[in-house]
Image (tube, grey):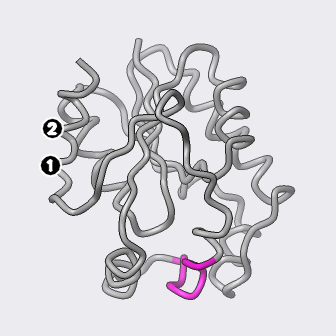
Amino acid sequence: MRRIVIMGVSGCGKTSVGQALAARLGAAFVDADDLHPPANVEKMRAGVPLTDADRAPWLDRVAARLQADAPVVVACSALRRAYRDRLRAGAGGPVTFIHLSGDRTLIAARMAARKGHYMPPALLDSQFATLEPPTAEEALTMGIEEDPDRIAAAILSALQ
């Protein structure tokens, strides 16, 4: 069974790529943004970065979704090694991490263009400051310059 986490800073394309990959795999898709407690959402909407204490219950909710009995693709920032370790520990089996990595200017432009998302572009710098890029042993890193379907195809090819 596959447990895949598409990770990276806000605005890098986790949801779009995750949905495309899940469709190709016939897997369920979970957007970890939907699992944040209301207090976290309000904090981010107000432009206040989350703390590790804010993220802990959210990460536990995400890990619980990784315990599915069927293949699942989860879009989750998983910015720090400790967060990824917490997800692995709570998942109930192996987890494959895919890190979507890209230029800050491109990501900022994407964030500015999206509508209806609670994460303001003003928090992008805090996302990059929090990010502990995974090693090659910990995750497959993919660039974000291509469209989501092409990135998903490249991920699938790399995983086979």
Considering the numbered disc 1 on the image, is that residue within a helix, a strand or a loop?
helix
Across and down, in percent, residue 116 comes to 42, 80
Mark 1 vs 2: CB contact within 8 A? yes
Across and down, in percent, residue 64 comes to 64, 30
- What is the quadrant of the C terminus in the image? top left
**Residue of label 1:** 149
Question: Which three-letter amino acid code belongs to the residue tagged 2?
Answer: Ala
Residue in the image at 38% along x and 87% along y: 112
Considering the numbered disc 2 on the image, is that residue within a helix, a strand or a loop?
helix
Q: Please check the rendered image and state whether residue 119 is part of the magenta-colored stretch, yes or no.
A: yes
Packing grade of label 2 (10 A; few <14, some 14-19, many >=20) is: some
**Disc 1 from disc 2: Cα separation:** 6 Å
* Residue 53 lies in quadrant: bottom right
Magenta segment: 118-125
Secondary structure that dominates the magenta span? helix
Residue in the image at 55% along x and 42% along y: 134
**Where is 87 relative to 131, above or below?**
above
Q: Please check the rendered image and state whether residue 98 is part of the magenta-colored stretch, yes or no.
A: no
- Give 93 or 42, whichever is nearer the viewer: 93
**Residue of label 2:** 153
**Where is 60 relative to 66, above or below?**
below
- Give 68 or 148, whichever is nearer the viewer: 148
- Give 80 or 50, whichever is nearer the viewer: 80
**Where is 118 relative to 159, above or below?**
below
Question: Which three-letter amino acid code belongs to the residue tagged 1?
Answer: Asp
- Give 81 or 20, whichever is nearer the viewer: 81
Residue in the image at 67% along x and 86% along y: 47
